[in-house]
Amino acid sequence: MILPPPLFKYTKRIHALSLVNKGEVKIGTLHDFQRIERHAPMIGDKDEGKKARYDNPVFASAGGLSRFARPIADSVFASLPTDPAARVLFLQCSFEKIDTSPNRWLYSTSTRLGASTMHAMDPAYDTCVRIDYVFAFFHAIEQELIRLNLATHGLIRPVRYRERTQHYLKDDGLDPVLLKPLSHVDQHEVRFIFFPAKEITEGHRILTIPKLRDFCEIDPRVDSIK
C-alpha cells in the first residue's frame, strides 16, 4: 500500500502539544475566517469563500447579451426585448455576479515543510505537526463531527491561488471555499472541508479525538528547512 505524502499543520507550541499528546484539534469555520478583526492578515480575509464572474461587452443589443449577462440585465430591467434588432443597446457595460460558499467547517494544513511556509501561515506560529497518516487523520475528524451531528461528510482539497474575479468564459467552476489570492501562495494550503449537518452557530469547535495521536507527531526539522 502506497501512503499519500504527509501534510503539515503549523500552529503555536501549546496547541501542537495538545494535538500530539491528547488528540485535541480546533476545527474552524469559513465565516470565522472572514472576521478579519480576529485573525492575522494571513488567516483572516473578508472575501474568504467568495468569487466574482463578469462580462464586459463593449457593445451589445438586449437580445445579443451573453448567456451570463442576460439574467443579470433581466433582474435590473424588466421586460427586455429578446429580438437582437430591438433598439435597446448596452455600451461599455459591466455585468458581475458574486458567488458565495455557504458556511463550512474547515481544517487547514500545508503540503510544504519549512519555516518560511510556517510564517506564511502566521508569523506567530512556532511549531509543525507532521500528519503522516493523512486519510486516517481526516476520517477520524470526519467521524467525530458526524457523531456529534455537526457534519454529514467531508473532503480533502488543495487551495488554488488566483484572482477571485474572472471573466465568466474563464471560470473554472471552482468552489469559492478553495480560492485564495496569489499573495498567499507560499502557504501551499490543503483544506479539510466538512459539510454541516445543521446551521453552524459557532466560530470554531474544539474536538478531543485520542486516536489522532497515532497519526501525527511534532516535526523538529521545521527550523532547519527554510
Image (cartoon, grey):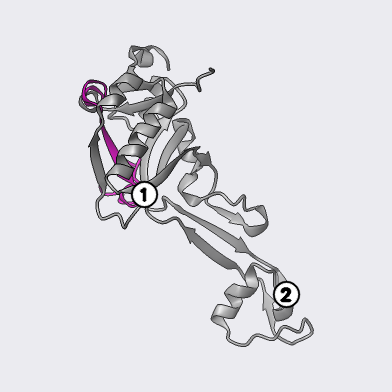
Q: Nearer the viewer, mark 1 or mark 2?
A: 1
Place residue 60 in its image quadrant: bottom right
Disc number for residue 186: none
User: Which residue has dot 2 on it?
Assistant: 60
Queried whether the magenta region covers residue 11, the answer comes back as no
Q: Nearer the viewer, residue 105 or 16?
A: 105
Instruction: Give the crowd class for mark 1: few <14, some 14-19, many >=20 residues within 10 Å.
Output: many
Q: Secondary structure at mark 1?
A: helix
Tell me which amino acid carries mark 1. Leu
Vertical relation: 169 (above or below) 108: below
- Most extreme residue toward the right is 85
Report x, y in % for residue 48.
Answer: 41, 50
Q: Secondary structure at mark 2?
A: strand
Vertical relation: 81 (above or below) 144: below
Vertical relation: 56 (above or below) 167: below
- Which residue is painted at 70% across and 80% down in the image? 62
Q: Nearer the viewer, residue 176 or 117?
A: 176
Cα distance between the residues tagged 1 and 2:
38 Å
- Which residue is painted at 77% across and 81% down in the image? 84
- Which residue is painted at 41% across and 24% down in the image? 116
Instruction: Give the crowd class for mark 2: few <14, some 14-19, many >=20 residues within 10 Å.
Output: some
User: Which residue has dot 1 on it?
Assistant: 30
Vertical relation: 53 (above or below) 104: below
Queried whether the magenta region covers residue 34, the answer comes back as yes
Q: Which residues are magenta?
A: 16-44
